[in-house]
Structures are given as C-alpha cells and as structure tokens.
Image (tube, helix red, strand yellow):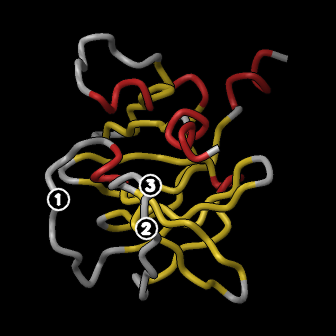
Amino acid sequence: MTNAVEQESIKVIVFQLADKEYAIPVSHVQGIEKLMHITRVPKTVNYVKGVINLRGVVTPIVDLRERFELPISKHEETTRIIIISLEDMEVGFVVDSANDVIDIPANAIEPQPEVVGSLEEEFISGVAKVGKRLLILLHLEKVLNPLK
C-alpha cells in the first residue's frame, strides 16, 4: 500500500516570471492564450490590466509581475495569458512564458521557505525540486484574494 502513496503526483503547468519558474495545478487551468488586446477598466488596482473577451466570456486579466511587485518588462512573443478557474471565477494571468506541463511527485513538494521575505511569499503554497529545477507553487486563493 505504501507504493500507491509514493506514486502520487500533481500535474502542473510551469510558467516563467522574471528568472523564476512557477507552477499552477492543471486542474485549475482552462487554457493558455497568446497575448491579445486587453480593454482597460477604470478604477481597478494597478495589477488588474483590464478584461478580454475570450470566446464570448469577459475575463479579467491580472499581470502577475505587478501582482508580485516584480520589475515590469515589455511583453515578448513568448508572453502568454494563462486562463485559470477557481470556484466560480475565471481569471487570466499574464506571464512571461508558459513552459510545459509536468508531474510533480507529491513527496518532492516542500513547504515554502520562511526566508523569502518578499511580497510574493504570501502567495506561495510550497516549492518543488524537480531535477535541477526549483518550482514555486502558487496559492491561487491568495493570489486572487482581492478580486473575490
């Protein structure tokens, strides 16, 4: 029976922000889109870039660089919008690039280190070492908290 526990893993989408790799469970990801026209919405916080009309659904767009107070960069050809759904809400995250889909063994996930000392630490649910990569797992409820 212990083998079944050891084999458990979580499938995640890995994406890039600045020089770090982050991960979101595939179960929350509705799709990955190329950057498209974002309609600005007045009187929203600075990291909410506006909304897009995605196949008839108006979806708010959050720039994760601004949400985590990372340096702003120009959007590149690799910039993507990851559409996530949480509870009854759909939101798009602007990321530098969406790298791949991988399985993280449950035993590779560790609690977030307490020495991070940045704004983004409150949005982290854990970290995972996969080969030579260090993936930061996002706590989606906390990232989206002010939008709810």
Q: Is residue 32 positioned above or below 14 on the image? A: below
Identity of the amino acid at label 2? Pro
Measure how far apart labels 1 and 2 are at the Cα level: 20 Å
Identity of the amino acid at label 1? Ile
Q: Secondary structure at mark 2?
A: loop
Q: In this view, which residue lies farthest toward the right?
A: 1
Q: Residue at x 72, y 55 (%)?
A: 89
- Residue 115: image quadrant is top left
Q: Dot 1: within a 10 Å radius of its alpha carbon, few (fewer than 14), some, or many (20 or more) residues? A: few
Pick the front one: 122 or 146: 146
Identity of the amino acid at label 3? Val
Disc number placed over residue 30 in the picture, else none? none
Judged by depth in the image, the label closer to the viewer, 3 or 2, is 2
Judged by depth in the image, the label closer to the viewer, 3 or 1, is 1
Residue 143 in picture, x, y percent from top left: 50, 40
Residue wearing tag 3: 14
Residue wearing tag 2: 42
Q: Residue at x 56, y 66 (%)?
A: 60
Residue wearing tag 1: 72
